[in-house]
């Protein structure tokens, strides 16, 4: 009833009841013959069981289909939707655009993995709890109406979508049919392929930003109510720290040097210091270290100062921020799960 699927219930429910009735009848028949003809009784039950499994676990709309059905997952696919996204997603020294594949079919949430496209959702039963609550993420969105929203992300037209860097939405239906909260014409239809309507979010933010001030915020209240403080994420970062920072007057700059699954390196330069904001998901097993720029004619020693460990603040509900002083600095984010577990299990002092 909740999913408006009531009209589809009678046929599968009737089939299930018929199979249960047939199974009960065969068990009754086999019980009477098990002593006199055990092989016959066992064969009867085995044949019925095989037929039941073959029918109910046979090819469906989500499995055992021809390989051509999954062609979009091939690394060398010629699929128009994938070709458009790969050609237009920007990955440079400040941007790493994210996409969302919504309602394109049962297997499409997996497609971004083989093409190295950063998807905001996709299949993932082990999502972080605060990410699921903030974005409304559930198991998958094989159908457009399976895209669930949250107070903090009631639409693709939201602060959270912008901070995620969600640049392109490839949807299996016109956006207005399932994103009913979005203002009309909020997103431009940039392509129409065989399976997708592709929309662009021009407000998607870069992956790295330099904020000149930090303000304390109650992230639990923001997730629950969906109400953000009045702030510009290009200038201000919300953190879970103990106090607000003194705002700087002059902006700084940040650029991505390298980016892998377990290490992200960012160079930062500013005259008065501030906060490097990395719009990747915060997790306590990430650690950050900072090196200070040492002017030198030899590029090999420019970053030879010792690394020093710094705190990663949970920022803007989901993301990461590191406070950096004035000058030039290199910030190295490293994912260290074993060390993270060790620290979590260590006795509190």
Image (cartoon, rainbow, N blue to C red):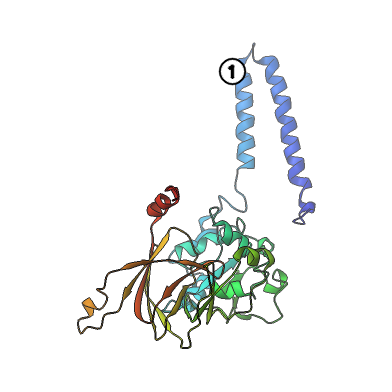
What residue would you read off at disc 1? 39
**Which of 206/194 is in front?**
206
Can you say whether 12 is above or below 208 in the image?
above
Image coords of residue 141 (percent x, y): 62, 60
Q: Residue at x 64, y 15 (%)?
A: 34
Q: Is residue 229 left or right of residue 338?
A: right
* Residue 104 visible from this viewpoint: no
Categorize mark 1 by other alpha carbons within 10 Å: few (<14), some (14-19), many (20+): few
| Residue projecting furthest to the front | 349
Can you say whether 251 is above or below 30 in the image?
below
Image coords of residue 151 (percent x, y): 68, 66
The mark total stands at: 1
* Residue 162 quadrant: bottom right
Q: Is residue 131 left or right of residue 278?
A: right
**Which of 6/271 is in front?**
271
* Residue 75 quadrant: bottom left
Q: Is residue 95 left or right of residue 230?
A: left
Image coords of residue 27 (percent x, y): 69, 23
Can you say whether 268 is above or below 306 in the image?
below
**Which of 201/294 is in front?**
294
Q: Residue at x 55, y 50 (%)?
A: 64
* Residue 6 visible from this viewpoint: yes
Secondary structure type for disc 1: helix
């Amino acid at each position: 009833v909740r999913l408006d699927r009531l009209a589809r219930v009678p046929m599968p429910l009737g089939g299930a009841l018929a199979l249960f009735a047939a199974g009960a009848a065969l068990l009754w028949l086999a019980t009477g013959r098990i002593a006199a003809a055990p092989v016959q009784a066992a064969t009867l039950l085995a044949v019925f069981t095989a037929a039941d499994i073959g029918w109910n676990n046979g090819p469906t709309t989500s499995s055992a289909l021809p390989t051509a059905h999954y062609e979009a997952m091939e690394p060398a696919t010629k699929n128009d939707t994938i070709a458009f996204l790969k050609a237009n997603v920007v990955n440079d020294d400040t941007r790493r655009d994210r996409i969302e594949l919504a309602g394109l079919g049962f297997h499409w949430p997996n497609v971004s993995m083989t093409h190295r496209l950063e998807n905001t959702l996709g299949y993932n039963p082990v999502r972080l709890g605060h990410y699921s609550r903030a974005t409304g993420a559930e198991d998958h969105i094989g159908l457009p109406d399976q895209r669930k929203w949250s107070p903090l992300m009631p639409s693709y037209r939201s602060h959270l979508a912008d901070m995620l860097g969600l640049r392109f939405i490839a949807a299996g239906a016109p956006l207005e049919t399932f994103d009913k909260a979005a203002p009309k014409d909020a997103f431009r239809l940039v392509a129409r392929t065989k399976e997708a309507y592709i929309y662009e979010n021009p407000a998607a933010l870069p992956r790295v930003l330099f904020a000149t001030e930090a303000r304390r915020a109650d992230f639990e209240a923001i997730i629950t109510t969906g109400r953000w403080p009045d702030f510009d994420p290009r200038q201000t970062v919300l953190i879970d720290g103990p106090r607000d920072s003194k705002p700087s007057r002059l902006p700084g700059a940040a650029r991505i040097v390298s980016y892998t699954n377990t290490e992200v390196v960012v160079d930062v330069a500013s005259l008065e210091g501030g906060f490097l904001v990395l719009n990747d998901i915060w997790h306590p097993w990430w650690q950050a270290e900072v090196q200070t720029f040492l002017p030198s004619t030899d590029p090999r020693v420019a970053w030879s100062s010792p690394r020093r460990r710094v705190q990663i603040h949970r920022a803007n509900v989901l993301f990461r921020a590191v406070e950096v002083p004035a000058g030039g600095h290199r910030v190295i984010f490293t994912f260290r799960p074993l060390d993270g577990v060790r620290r979590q299990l260590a006795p509190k002092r």
